[in-house]
Amino acid sequence: MHRRLIQTAGVFVLCVSVLVTRLAWLTGSERLAEAAARQTSYTLSAGESRGSITDRNGEPLVGEETVELAAVSPDSSGLPALLSLLSDTERRRVQSAAAEGKPVLARLQKGADTSALPDDILLLTTPVRYGETQLAAHLIGYTDSEGHGVAGLEKSYDDLLYHSGEETRVTFESDGVGHLLAVQPRVTVTAETAGLRLTIDKTIQRIAEEEGGAIAKGTIVVMEPQTGELLGCASFPSYAPDRLAESLSDPAAPLVNRAFSAYAVGSVFKTVTTAAACIAGEEGLFYTCTGSITVGDRVFHCHQTAGHGALDLTAALRESCNPYFIALGERVGSALLLRTASDLSFGKSLRLAPGLETAAGLLPQGEPTPAGLANLSFGQGELSATPIQLALMMSAVVNGGKTPAPVLVAGTTDGDGNLTPEERQPPVLALSQKQAEAIRLALVAAIAENENALARSERVTVGGKTGTAQTGQYDENGQELCNGWFVGFFPAESPRYVVSVLCEESESGNKDAAPVFRRIAERITATEN
């Protein structure tokens, strides 16, 4: 019995020794110390950005502006001074956190003077996704409260952009019972810099948005005609991605991207009728305009009620004579006219990014009536197109006859800035080089020989076509609302840019859209000199 008691006591002592040894090891364990440190700290997110979106030259289109944050513990002596630098909403949030004994990150008001803040308040500068005057807002789109893209390119490439970008965290240390330690908080930054590179040129985009500021409703598209790359694409009115609620109730519908929407075209379509005439060998038509033309039992009037007299094709483009183009359309025939329009991008929805497409617009199907063909020949009737389609049409005229596919996204970039190009669609051969050149010369002459053409410039040579499209909609005074267009190119001799300008509810294309085109052409040309 005595021996058993001794054995039992020995086993007990041995177990206690093992437990004490294990406890000592655990107490000194580095892993446990790290776990304890994590359990006795407060980590706050100072900002989490998405992947980059840049222009064709790598210039940022998002994340350009910054905000200043203050990291503060609830017992900081500088808390009263900090509160005076905050908005009312931020002030209440910080006071609530301080009352609960929690640290907080406070967003300072713009231009706040922080010189009086003590050293125990940490100041950080972090980027914000969208600026107060965000460029290319309709293309870029916006995100939801959880940081996911819900519109535009933000939505199209959400998976890439959401899992890229930069995150900044601020960690406040505390003791084992949760009391904050009087030490400077720790800042950690993790970054994944993948993103998108667009074909947009930031300088051209800014010019388009500034010159379009006078357009109440409408759009401007600037395109490189050889490639179909969008260099600028602005819709008016615009909106602030971080203040969407203001736009939802606006009757002008600022969230609509008008560059991707279809509108009545008007006389700009006479460029298509001219193209079909060149293909048919009818470009030499001479016609005497008497002020009207009869098709079946319908009479179509010219805007020049007394008539234009004898016209060739160049003069008809210059004067935008409807009877001439009705006669030309009759000679060409509906089948060729519709096929030419299709080859020049009409009636087709155009893909610019995953899930991001333009409207297809309207192009008559089947054999139109004689009156329907007459309407189509000068751009009226069952016809509509997007500003991008009209830019593609004009691109084919000035690049030798090839209608390019529109391009908005150059490709995706990795963390080192290496570009993986997006796949591009081949162009459609719509015209021969000779036919395209004849149309280009006619459109140059139509502006140069018209002393009333407000697209004319003393600084750069241009060509193009106006349009004033009836919409069938009327204002409260019974006046029909028209779309004013100008679609043109410059420099005229060797075009490098095509510009499509739409002014909704305007008086005329020449009065409202053409001057906008001229100013854009002059400003872009000035940047190259």
Image (cartoon, rainbow, N blue to C red):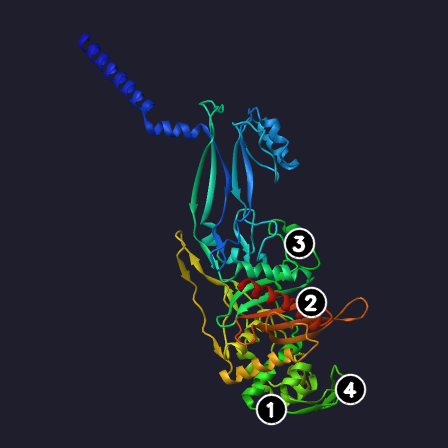
Which residue: 42% across, 30% down? 38
- The answer to which of marks 1 and 2 sits earlier in the sequence is 1
Mark toward the viewer: 3 or 4: 4
- Estimate the spatial distance between the alpha carbons at disc 3 and disc 2, rounded to whole Å: 19 Å
Residue at which label 1 appears: 284
- Estimate the spatial distance between the alpha carbons at disc 1 and disc 2, rounded to whole Å: 34 Å
Residue at which label 3 appears: 247
**Quadrant of the image containing the N terminus:** top left
Residues tagged 3 and 4 counted as in contact (Cβ below 8 A): no
Residue at which label 4 appears: 306
Taking the view exactly as shown, the residue that stands out farthest to the top is: 2
- The answer to which of marks 3 and 2 sits earlier in the sequence is 3
Amino acid type, mark 4: Ala
| Residue 247: % across, % down | 66, 54
**Quadrant of the image containing the C terminus:** bottom right
Amino acid type, mark 2: Glu
The 10 Å Cα crowd at callout 1, few under 14, some 14 to 19, many 20 or more, is few
The 10 Å Cα crowd at callout 4, few under 14, some 14 to 19, many 20 or more, is few
* In-front residue for pair 20/104: 104
Mark toward the viewer: 1 or 2: 1
| Residue 148: % across, % down | 52, 50
